Structure formats: structure tokens, C-alpha cells
Image (cartoon, grey):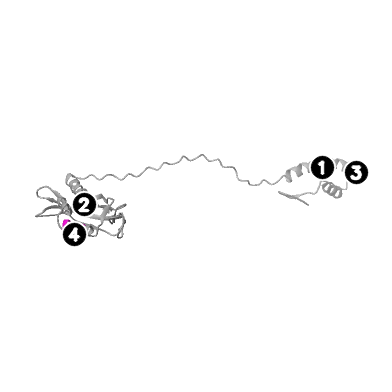
């Protein structure tokens, strides 16, 4: 048997089929010629059918429609809606930081007592002591820290007034202590720290900062 790629058991030729018929039926030469013609014809048809290459399973080309790009919708952080009292507490913190920065930048010539215009003790006293030490060393503040509020919660109500706690992110990026030549001194703290300011709404209606605290981690 002849092996053809993709075809199993393909006969070597039609002659073998004719001889097999002759031996089986013992027919004469004329009859053999006729049979040979018929056998050749039938055999050729069989060969064409049997020797056809086996269909191979070729992967069909898959035409997929282009998937339109999905546009991502940006997640918007809602802006907090503060009450009048909460906004006033926030404003007092921002005013305190502004005055604190102005005093620090103007050292050693600044009047550190001006911090009491926007702050009460203990933070006013602590700030005066700190900046007096900076001035004595010839240091001053470069850059300006900032504070981004995220939460305001009411605190205790006592004889001094209503207290509020203003929490947020204290940022000192680009702000540092420098000597009289402008060279940085000391070690910078964490650039972004979570912190909270305590604010009092005095019975007179005035808001001022009384204390602050920072927490571990970043914001």
C-alpha cells in the first residue's frame, strides 16, 4: 500500500485490482480487457475519493468587532458643606497659620507677641517661646506651611465658650528653617501630617485657636 500524506490505505494502482478479478473469476482476455476498462474507471473514481487529502482542522479566522474604549469617569470628592460656625472655626485656623508664618518669616525683627491676636493659651505661649528661641539663634522661616481641613467636630461647651476640633492635613512642603545666610538648618519634619486644631468660639463671638496636635503617618 502506498502512504500519501493525509490519506490512509491508498492502493498502489488499479492493476492489482484487475489481476485480482482475473484470478478470482478466471475470465478470458477479451473479457479481461473490458473488465480492465471498467475496473480502471471505477478504481480511478475510488482513488480520487479515497486518496483525497484528509481535511485538516485549520483555525478559522475570527473577525471580532473592535470594542469601543471605555471612558473612565473621574471620581469627584464632594466639597464639604460647612455650617457658619464650622466655617468660622476653619477661618480662625487659617488666620492663625497666616500670622504664625508672617512672624516666622520676619525673624528676628518680628513681634512674636502678635500671635495673641489670633490665638489663646497654651498655643500662644508655646509659639512665643519657640520663635523667641529661633530669633536668638538668628533663624527664620522660609516658605509657608498650609493646612487643608477635612473635618470639623464640636467639642465641649464651657465657661470660655464652644470648642471645635478642626482636623485636616498639615503641609510643610517647601517650608524650612534657615540661618541669616539662608542656609537650611535643623531637620525637616514630615511634609504632610494629619493634625487637629482646637478652636474656641468665645462668648463674645470671637474665634481663636487654643491648641494643636499632629498624628503619626501622612496625609
Real-space Cα distance between discs 1 and 4? Answer: 120 Å
Left or right of 199 in this view: 67:
right
Q: Secondary structure at mark 4?
A: helix
Is 103 contained in the magenta span? no
Horizontal and vertical percent position of residue 147? 26, 50
Local packing at callout 2 (Cα closer than 10 Å; few below 14, some 14-19, many 20+) is many
Q: Farthest residue toward the front?
A: 181
Q: Are dots 3 and 2 in contact, CB under 8 Å?
A: no
Q: Any mark on residue 79, and which?
A: none
Real-space Cα distance between discs 3 and 2? Answer: 130 Å
Question: Secondary structure of the magenta portion, mostly?
Answer: helix
Choose mark 1 or mark 2, whichever is in front.
Answer: 2
Q: Are dots 2 and 4 in contact, CB under 8 Å?
A: no
| Residue 154 appears in the figure | no
Q: Tell how many labels.
A: 4
Horizontal and vertical percent position of residue 131? 21, 57
- First to last magenta residue range: 122-132
At 79% across and 43% down in the image, what residue appears? 43
Whichever of callouts 1 and 4 sits on the residue coming sooner in the sequence is 1
* Observer-nearest of 20 and 168: 168
Looking at the figure, which quarter contains the C terminus?
bottom left
Q: Are dots 1 and 2 in contact, CB under 8 Å?
A: no
Real-space Cα distance between discs 2 and 4? Answer: 13 Å
Q: Secondary structure at mark 3?
A: helix
Whichever of callouts 3 and 2 sits on the residue coming sooner in the sequence is 3
Is 131 contained in the magenta span? yes
Label 2, on which residue? Answer: 103
Label 4, on which residue? Answer: 129
Label 1, on which residue? Answer: 40
Q: Secondary structure at mark 1?
A: helix
Label 3, on which residue? Answer: 29
Whichever of callouts 4 and 3 sits on the residue coming sooner in the sequence is 3
Amino acid at each position: 500500500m502506498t502512504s500519501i500524506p493525509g490519506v490512509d490505505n491508498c492502493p498502489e494502482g488499479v492493476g492489482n485490482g484487475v489481476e485480482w478479478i482475473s484470478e478470482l473469476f478466471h475470465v478470458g482476455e477479451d473479457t479481461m480487457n473490458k473488465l480492465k476498462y471498467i475496473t480502471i474507471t471505477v478504481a480511478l473514481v475510488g482513488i480520487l475519493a479515497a486518496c483525497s487529502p484528509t481535511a485538516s482542522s485549520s483555525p478559522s479566522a475570527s473577525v471580532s468587532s473592535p470594542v469601543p474604549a471605555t471612558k473612565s469617569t473621574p471620581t469627584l470628592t464632594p466639597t464639604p458643606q460647612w455650617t457658619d460656625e464650622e466655617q468660622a472655626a476653619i477661618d480662625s485656623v487659617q488666620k492663625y497659620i497666616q500670622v504664625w508664618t508672617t512672624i516666622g518669616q520676619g525673624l528676628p525683627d518680628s513681634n512674636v507677641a502678635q500671635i495673641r491676636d489670633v490665638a489663646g493659651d497654651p498655643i500662644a505661649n508655646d509659639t512665643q517661646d519657640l520663635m523667641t528661641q529661633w530669633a536668638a539663634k538668628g533663624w527664620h522661616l522660609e516658605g509657608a506651611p498650609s493646612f487643608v481641613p477635612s473635618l470639623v467636630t464640636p467639642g465641649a461647651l464651657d465657661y470660655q465658650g464652644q470648642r471645635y476640633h478642626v482636623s485636616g492635613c498639615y503641609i510643610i512642603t517647601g517650608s524650612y528653617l534657615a540661618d541669616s545666610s539662608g542656609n537650611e538648618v535643623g531637620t525637616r519634619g514630615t511634609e504632610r501630617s494629619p493634625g487637629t486644631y482646637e478652636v474656641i468660639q468665645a462668648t463674645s463671638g470671637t474665634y481663636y485657636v487654643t491648641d494643636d496636635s499632629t498624628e503619626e503617618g501622612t496625609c
